[in-house]
Image: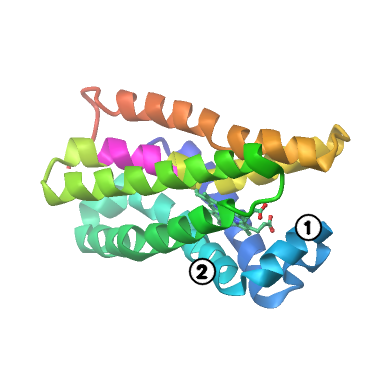
Amino acid sequence: MRLGFLVALSVLSVLVAAYAVGVYGFGPGAANLPPAFRENFGRRPLAVAAHIFASAAALLLGPVQFSARVRRRWPAVHRLVGRVYLGAAVPVGGLAGLYLSWFAFGGPVARLGFGCLAVAWLYTAVRGYAAARGRDFAAHRRWMVRNYALTFAAVTLRLYLSLGHVLDLPFDLSYQLISWLCWVPNLVVGEGLARAARGPAADRR
Ligand code: HEM
């Protein structure tokens, strides 16, 4: 993965993870969100905490895995970080996200959007893990590119929320749109990157 792209990915991921941990770990939590959000989150504090902290860890750990230098020089780091990402961060964040999507703000459209995102996130993680266990590293790489494209929905969601605010769209309409927009285009881009990684220059560890 090109350095500039990886740096941009890492900076955005760190900013959103810092926002999530700052607001929900040390800040006001859901206090500044619309009342329906607050009520929903107040009823499920454990699922909210599990989702936010585990997903923020996934967001932070992903870019480390895409560094060819880390993979080449410190393969043990790649394996350890991969175990935490696939063994804890995505399963805990994804299952809690799937549970929360059932109650999400924005009605059935948003619930289905976030639910499908959660299922796709968990599915790509299982395929990525199985490929690594089977020592099919080309397939592992492709599944993990798709998987992180979905993790990155946390970043695109917040970019689109700001855009909805600037365009002065009603919040519930923009939230319904964003529950799909935050991940479907990411998956298309991830698919393009995964296919490009099949080229001769690909790192086929
Ligand atoms: C990729 C799979 C993900 C799914 C399926 C998912 C799903 C959800 C759902 C359903 C909610 C509750 C929304 C509502 O009640 O209306 C939520 C909220 C939240 N999620 Fe995720 N999420 C995912 C990834 C992430 C990641 C990677 C982060 C990392 C920071 C994250 C951080 C948050 C935060 C901070 C909230 C609280 C809402 C806010 O303050 O903006 N999520 N997520």
Query: Where on the image, by quarter, is ligand 1?
Result: bottom right
Residue sitting nearer the eye, 202 or 139: 139
Q: Is residue 163 visible?
A: no
Q: Is residue 37 above or below residue 132?
A: below
User: At which x and y percent is residue 76?
Assistant: 21, 63
Q: Using the rendered view, name the quadrant where residue 103 is placed.
A: bottom right
- Under 8 Å from ligand 1: the CB of mark 2? no
- Total of numbered circles in the picture? 2
Give the residue type that dot 1 points to: Ala
Residue sitting nearer the eye, 181 or 34: 34
Residue furthest left in the image: 134
Measuring 23% from the left and 60% from the top, which residue is drawn there?
A: 79
Q: In this view, does 189 lie above or below 6?
A: above
Mark 1 and mark 2: span between their CA atoms?
A: 20 Å
Q: Name the residue under label 1.
A: 36
Which stretch appears magenta?
Answer: 141-148
Measuring 30% from the left and 39% from the top, which residue is drawn there?
A: 143
Query: Image quadrant for the N terminus?
Result: top left
Give whichever of discs 1 and 2 has the lower sequence position.
1
- Under 8 Å from ligand 1: the CB of mark 1? no
Residue sitting nearer the eye, 91 or 197: 91
Measuring 24% from the left and 31% from the top, which residue is drawn there?
A: 202
Side (left or right) of 36 relative to 57: right
Give the residue type that dot 2 points to: Ala
Q: Which element is circle 2 on?
A: helix
Q: Which element is circle 1 on?
A: helix
Q: Mark 2 points at which residue?
A: 50
Q: Residue 196 carries which label?
A: none
Measuring 61% from the left and 32% from the top, which residue is drawn there?
A: 181
Q: Using the rendered view, name the quadrant where residue 194 is placed.
A: top left
User: At which x and y percent is residue 177?
Assistant: 68, 33
Side (left or right) of 144 relative to 104: left
